[in-house]
Amino acid sequence: MARVVVIGGGFGGLASAARLAKLGHEVTLIEQERTLGGALTTIEKDGFRWDAGPTSTLLPAVIRDFFRKSGRAAEKEIDLVPLEPVAQHRFADETVLDLPGGSRAAQLDAIESALGRGAGARWVSYVDDFAEVWEALRKDWFERPWSPEHAPKQTRALLETRLTLQKLVAKEFKDSRLRDLALHATRFEGHDPRNVPAWVGVWSYVEQNFGAWTLPGGMGQLTGVLAERLATRGVTVTTSTTATDLVVEAGRVVAVSTTAGDLAADVVVVAIDPRRLPALADQVARTMPVIPPVMCHMGIVGEVPDLPHEVVIHGDPCLVLRTNGTAPDGAHAWTVLGRGRLAEDIVTALQRSGIRVRDQVEVRIDRSPRELVADWNGSPSGVLWQGRGTVRHRMGTTSPIAGVYLAGAHTTPGAGLPSVGLSAALVAQVVGPA
Ligand SMILES: Cc1cc2nc3c(=O)[nH]c(=O)nc-3n(C[C@H](O)[C@H](O)[C@H](O)COP(=O)(O)OP(=O)(O)OC[C@H]3O[C@@H](n4cnc5c(N)ncnc54)[C@H](O)[C@@H]3O)c2cc1C
């Protein structure tokens, strides 16, 4: 049995701690804030409740696998439901597309009828091309710790490609709406598609094949369930404590320095931005964090348009409206996120886009990117793509320091709940049973 210290109580840290405890290790998790969850939390005010960060997830199998491997099946603890549609896309020419998830045929039909004849066929043909990419990445990138040594030549070539997502999409589509559809997720996560390798488009394939899923009442509830799982598994949780560095002797970690003193450790899981720990900072000197979007949580009274869970308003700025908050009777809890040229108040920008609720907003909480990074002690959106080299410059599951492993948005395979959940599974795989 190893003494494991997990640094960071976001989804990455919580999932790693629960898995390692189930494998029989003695686990302590330390979190800088008073509460757990990182971005995976809820915000409440005057009877309104919003997800602070994620509101849905792709690849629900990751969450199901976590529950199975850490003690109890997901169905016994949470109610994961598919989102239908995955999102409504509103384009600059006022076309509206309700994009279904989990079905190639449904996407073909919906795009064909919203964007015109031939558009659906072009879209599914683009997505089909990612089938092989998905198979390769699943085996060598998502389900085992990435290393160029173990991967077949084709996967190495895929990850090293010079083809960017921007170029691929420009080549595939003349229709700017299809281009926006293909580039939206990457752009909205804060990346410039000119710096993103083409294979990252695989998420369109994942969305089409496995759908997007949510928890009625908010994704943030997952943190409460995970915290219970840690308690059941006997994990010691220490909040309001900051990890300041790793103590390394003869190339092996022996402790974590914290604001409450040193914690002895045989194994350390770093589930935060490694740039925060001097012992690892040099390893990631060439990375930059992604800046989160501008956010505004709104408590709205009176009649509102009937909108799906997520509405994407393409353009510059690009706005994403998430309608899944919980509110008192007759009211609505929505969140609007913005990226790009936001030269005016975000609720005014939403009004201008045709969703006119500005005068009904009774409660609002504005959160700037700077405030989000300060509140979360780093960016939950992970590492910025700066070209294909980012695969090498970002850290993987293992580190050059014996006993130190990495999970969370800043490591391979990347940000977002599916990748972060997989990073915890990879750590458990490498550390192994006690
Ligand atoms: C606005 C927004 C919306 C999003 N929406 C979605 C979505 O809909 N679907 C999706 O899949 N993904 C979404 N994401 C991405 C997803 O939320 C994150 O990638 C994921 O939650 C990151 O988890 P994490 O554990 O790596 O990091 P975090 O959630 O950032 O957690 C890190 C934790 O570590 C703590 N910490 C930091 N430094 C220290 C230290 N030195 N010592 C101790 N503790 C420390 C922090 O306080 C924090 O609690 C969204 C992200 C944002 C910002």
Image (cartoon, rainbow, N blue to C red):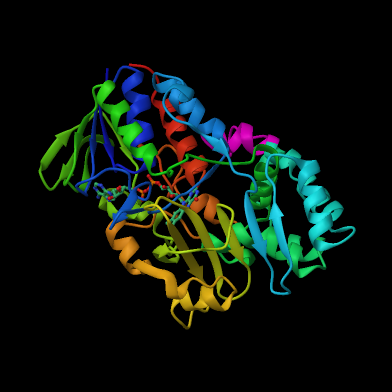
Instruction: Tell me which segment is drawn in magenta.
Output: 135-152
Q: Nearer the viewer, residue 373 or 88?
A: 88
Residue 52 belongs to the span the image colors magenta? no
Horizontal and vertical percent for residue 130? 74, 45
Q: How many marks?
A: 0
> Is 18 positioned to the left or the right of 426 in the image?
left
In the rendered image, the vertical position of residue 30 relative to residue 18, given as above or below = below
Q: Quadrant of residue 15?
A: top left
Horizontal and vertical percent for residue 218? 43, 44
In the rendered image, the vertical position of residue 87 relative to residue 313, given as above or below = above
In the rendered image, the vertical position of residue 422 relative to residue 205, given as above or below = above
Horizontal and vertical percent for residue 292? 43, 63
Q: Please, which residue is most extreme toward the left here?
A: 261
Q: Please, which residue is most extreme toward the right here?
A: 117
Q: Nearer the viewer, residue 403 or 144?
A: 144
> Is 106 positioned to the left or the right of 245 in the image?
right
Residue 165 seen in render: no
Looking at the rendering, in which quadrant would you find the C terminus?
top left
Task: Name which residue lies at 67% across and 47% down.
Answer: 202
Task: Name which residue lies at 49% across and 35% down.
Answer: 422
Horizontal and vertical percent for residue 317? 55, 75
> Is 232 positioned to the left or the right of 160 in the image?
left
Task: Name which residue lies at 28% across and 57% down.
Answer: 45
> Is 3 positioned to the left or the right of 199 in the image?
left
Residue 275 seen in render: yes
In the rendered image, the vertical position of residue 355 relative to residue 330, given as above or below = below
Task: Name which residue lies at 89% across and 58% down.
Answer: 118
Residue 136 belongs to the span the image colors magenta? yes
Looking at the rendering, in which quadrant would you find the N terminus?
top left
